[in-house]
Every structure is written in structure tokens, then in C-alpha cells.
Image (cartoon, grey):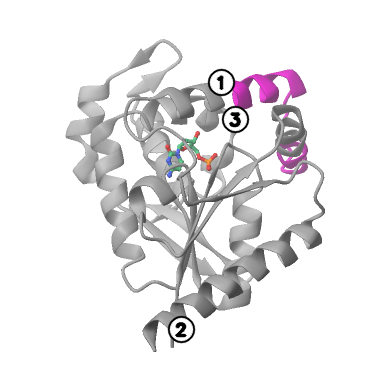
Amino acid sequence: MSKITIAIDGFSSTGKSTIAKQLARHLGYVYVDSGAMYRAVTFYAMDNDLITDDFFDVEALISQLENIKISFVFNEDLGFAEVYLNGVNIEKEIRTLRVSSFVSKVAEISEVRALLVKQQQHMGRNKGVVMDGRDIGTVVFVDAELKLFMTASAETRAIRRYNELLERGDDVVYEDVLRNVQERDYIDSHREDSPLIMAEDAIEIDNSTLTLEAQFDMILDLANKALEKEKSSET
Ligand code: DC
């Protein structure tokens, strides 16, 4: 049976994971949250005192990369795979604002990127994967049959993220969340290695005013068209 690769990139909190999970469930594909892998490395650095507000031992992190084993384990109840670091479920720990405030710095390191990109390409080697991140269409799967680039205003995204954190019970201030969104936008799109840019063949989706249903219908239609094209190219 024909399968395609779906690459979803965009700024933080643009709803990439929501649409990626919906698509993967609908198509019976594997969903991979590549951001969770950068967050897992960040969590490792925090846990081992390699990064604090005014200190980051990049060399030590690079030399310890071989100690970092990231895996995904599907959780039937949640309907998606949770991230594990060296066999320990860290899905909750990696979603805090503290991890978000350090993750862009970790994601700037070329050695970290090279390692994670290799693992991501391995996960997608048989196609049938929906992966979201920042460089999926430009670096990880340059030949993906469908590439989406999600956008929405920084304020819309900060409100979404703020509500998510409140729902989790985190004590956060909206202005801090907005600042984190804007800082990450800047670092993610200005870093030297694999900056966040839209692939030339990506389709831009601005979902500031789209309902989740409208967005899903529109994107499923794009996925079905890409699948048809793939099928006809195989015959
Ligand atoms: O998608 P997210 O917010 O969980 O991603 C966390 C950070 O990881 C994001 O600020 C940038 C980085 N990242 C990246 O550089 N490349 C990816 N493919 C995914 C995430």
C-alpha cells in the first residue's frame, strides 16, 4: 500500500502537533514530535546541571550525547506516543516553561541536531509518518510528499500556550509566555544551523482564524491529494 511522508513545520504553538496527531490517527500513520526530542536533550542538560540561567556547558553536553537515549512509547489511553529519556517517561517534565526557556539554546548546537536528525530519518525510513518540528521539510525529509508550514500571530499562539499551561496547573503569567514565544521565534529562525524557514515546496497554513474542524478538513484534503499523486506515480 502506498504511503507518504508528511512534514509539518512552523513557529511554536501554531497547532502543529494537534493537526499532526489528527492526521496520523486518521491515516494510520506514526506521529513523531521532533520538538520533544530537543526538549528531552534539554531536560537531560538541566537534570545534570549543564545549563542554568547564566551558564551552559556546551562541550560537556556534546561529550555526553552518547548517554542520551530517547525513545517514544505509544500510550493507548492518550492515543499518542510519549517520550522517554533513558527508559524514564519524561512527557510531563519536558512541557514546562523552564524547559521551553532553554530548549532553543540546545537546539542551536549542530552536534545535537545531527544526532536527532539521524534518528528522525531512521524513524521515517518506511514512510507512513507525520513529523512536526522546525526543519522537517527543509532538512529531515526534503523529499516529503506533503510539506506544511503553519503560522499564526504571536499573540494568538501565546494565548493558546498560556491556556495549555494553566490547564496543566502551572502557575504562569501571560506576558512571560508571550515573551518566550517571541524569543523562541527569533532564535529558531536566526540560528546558523537549520534555521526555521519555509521550504520552497511547502504549503503555508495561517490558522489564526481557522476552526480545528476547518483546518483538519483542508489538510486532510491536501494529504489525500498527495497520496493519490504518489499512487499514480507508482503505477
Ligand atoms: O515544537 P516544540 O515547541 O516542542 O519545540 C521545542 C524547541 O525545539 C523549539 O523551540 C525549537 C526546537 N526544535 C528544532 O530546533 N527543530 C525541530 N525539528 C523541532 C524543535
Which residue occupies 48% across, 46% down?
133
Q: Report the amino acid beneath label 3.
A: Leu
Is the shortest distance between ligand 1 and the CB of mark 2 under 8 Å?
Answer: no
Q: Report the amino acid beneath label 2.
A: Ser
Q: Is residue 150 above or below residue 76?
A: above
- Tag 2–tag 3 contact (CB < 8 Å): no
Q: Quadrant of the C terminus?
A: bottom left
Q: Is residue 170 something that shows in the picture?
A: no
- Kindly give the residue lying farthest to the top in the view shown: 54
Compute the Cα span from label 1 to label 2: 44 Å
Classify residue 111 as left or right of residue 6. Answer: left
Which residue occupies 75% across, 28% down?
155
Magenta residues, start to end: 163-182
Give how far across and how far down residue 196 sits, in percent.
46, 35
The 10 Å Cα crowd at callout 2, few under 14, some 14 to 19, many 20 or more, is few
| Label 1 or label 2, whichever comes before in sequence order | 1
Compute the Cα span from label 2 to label 3: 46 Å
Q: Which residue is mark 3?
A: 97
Q: Which residue is mark 1?
A: 183
Give how far across and how far down residue 54 sits, in percent.
41, 10
Give how far across and how far down residue 168 sits, in percent.
72, 43
Q: Which residue is mark 2?
A: 232
Of the residues tagged 3 and 1, which is closer to the observer?
1
Give how far across and how far down residue 80 sits, in percent.
57, 65
